[in-house]
Amino acid sequence: MPLSLDTPIQRPLAALALAAVLLNCGGCLMQPNISAKVVTVDGQTVEVPLNTVAVPVTDDVVTINTLQFSPWVVPDKPRQITLSSIIKFKEGAVPTHIVIEDVTDDPIEEIINEPSPKIVKDGLIGIISRPYLPDDDHVKWVLTLDNNVRVYRYTVTLKDGSTHVLYRGVFIPAQMKNLMRFQLGIPPG
């Protein structure tokens, strides 16, 4: 006798099979992974994700965990913008110098030059740039109204004499730039 979904034993099995398929595919809503390949001023090709959270960039010794821009607000002074980054070092790796440069456009702009970085805890360093006025060449891209991609080159020298160069690309959508301009007190464009 052929089995069908009308058979009492088949209904629960079919329901379980359907539940298993739905649970398995519950997380398989596929989002395309979109990125842009950008060629930096120094000739490097960097893939920058445009629709996902940025993943850490690493060479297994130095790892760039985060890179973000923040308003710098001090009472009675013009609002400015800073760049900050968290960098993780493999156990035993001791940094002696860190330079972060914007290599998106010519001329290359040095953002941070830290000649004596100190590991704080668990191989991590938090580093922050000096504040920049919005029309400063280092951050004037915030004044434009379009989407933007920036690429930053990290040059890290370690105590053992080795130099590690990593590139971190950042997609900055127009909406984020609008929020940054608002935080900086710049009227909408």
Image (spheres, rainbow, N blue to C red):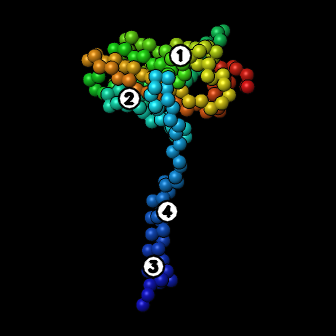
Closer to viewer: mark 3 or mark 1: 1
Residue 130 at what x, y percent from top left? Answer: 52, 13
At label 2, the amino acid type is Thr
Image point (47%, 19%), residue name: 101
Q: Nearer the viewer, residue 115 or 73?
A: 115
At label 1, the amino acid type is Pro
Query: In 3D space, how far apart are the residues under numbered discs 2 and 3 (Cα atoms)?
Result: 53 Å
Kindly indicate whether the residue at mark 3 contacts the one at mark 2 (C-beta within 8 angstroms): no
Q: In the rendered structure, find residue 107 and report the number of the disc placed on it.
A: 1
The residue indicated by pointer 2 is: 63
At label 4, the amino acid type is Leu
Query: In 3D space, how far apart are the residues under numbered discs 3 and 4 (Cα atoms)?
Result: 18 Å
At label 3, the amino acid type is Gln
The residue indicated by pointer 4 is: 22
Quadrant location of residue 166? top left
Q: Secondary structure at mark 2?
A: strand
Image point (61%, 22%), residue name: 141
Residue 84 at what x, y percent from top left? Answer: 49, 21
Residue 82 at what x, y percent from top left? Answer: 55, 18
Query: In 3D space, how far apart are the residues under numbered discs 4 and 2 (Cα atoms)?
Result: 37 Å
Question: Please, which residue is most extreme toward the front here?
Answer: 43
Specify few, some or many for label 4: CA neighbours under 10 Å numbering under 14, 14-19, or 20 or more: few
Q: In the rendered structure, find residue 10 and report the number of the disc placed on it.
A: 3
Specify few, some or many for label 1: CA neighbours under 10 Å numbering under 14, 14-19, or 20 or more: few
